[in-house]
Image: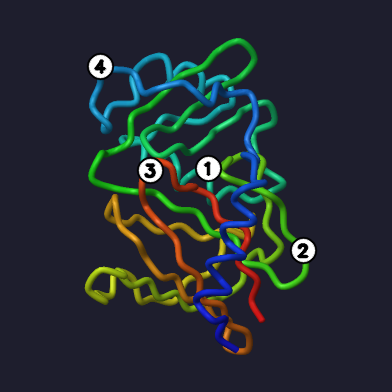
Amino acid sequence: MHLPKTAATLTALALLLTITACTGGADPDASPTAAGDARDLGPDASALLATFDISAPNTVGDLIEELQAQPLAERPKGLMASVRVDALLLSAGDSEVSLPLPTDEFHLSVAPYLDTTHECFYHSLTTCVGELGDTPLHVTITDDADGAVLVDMDVTTYNNGFFDVTLPPDRDITLTITDGEHIAEVPLGTRDDDPTCVTSIQLT
């Protein structure tokens, strides 16, 4: 059944007050490098990725998708990849690279659940694991300001239990998820202080 929006808002706020990132190794105060287009990963990122036998793709978005889609058993051990609002932070050992993300996009990773979840704020592409891996869902996202439908599509979660959407920044949105039997509707945001990782959505 649909959750009342007021109740969902209170639940989301309560969870966000105690949420921490499910990422590690990267500096939470780090900012994107000033030089370099979002389509150029650069030699530092390419070298870091090469140590894990990962060929650097053309764009940061491609790299996010590649790491997100990796089966759990094939995740590169020792590589941390944290999705922030403005950058993808890569780190391994003492090496860290910050890759700027497009300023006109907000990258959101969502892992709905039925029974078990974990706390998360900034999505870690290499460590976060949701309950519902490889699960078909229908996702609808509307803009609260004018009711415009931003997303209306069938998705299948990656092996790690997440699905991704790219949204306009600086919006208040309503996200609805259903697996055909269970459903959830929650308010979210796409601002600088909003999470890139949402794991608090329980399908009921």
SS state under label 1: helix
Residue that carries the numbered disc 4 in the rendered image: 35
Residue that carries the numbered disc 1 in the rendered image: 67
Q: In the figure, residue 161 lies in which quadrant?
A: bottom right
The answer to whether 97 is drawn above or below residue 202 in the figure is above
Pointer 4 with pointer 1, Cβ within 8 A: no
**Which of labels 2 and 3 is toward the front?**
2
CA neighbours of label 3 inside 10 A, class few (<14), some (14 to 19), many (20+): few
Q: CA distance from mark 1 to mark 2?
A: 23 Å
- The percent position of residue 57, horizontal first and vertical second, equals 37, 35
Q: In the figure, residue 142 lies in which quadrant?
A: bottom left
**Which of labels 2 and 4 is toward the front?**
2
Q: Which residue type does callout 1 highlight?
A: Leu
Residue that carries the numbered disc 2 in the rendered image: 116
Q: How many marks?
A: 4
**Which of labels 3 and 4 is toward the front?**
4
- The percent position of residue 108, horizontal first and vertical second, equals 44, 53
Q: Which mark is residue 62?
A: 3
Q: CA distance from mark 3 to mark 4?
A: 19 Å
Pointer 3 with pointer 1, Cβ within 8 A: no
Chain-order first, disc 4 or disc 1: 4
Chain-order first, disc 2 or disc 4: 4
The answer to whether 161 is drawn above or below residue 50 in the figure is below
Q: CA distance from mark 4 to mark 1?
A: 24 Å
Q: CA distance from mark 2 to mark 4?
A: 41 Å
SS state under label 2: loop
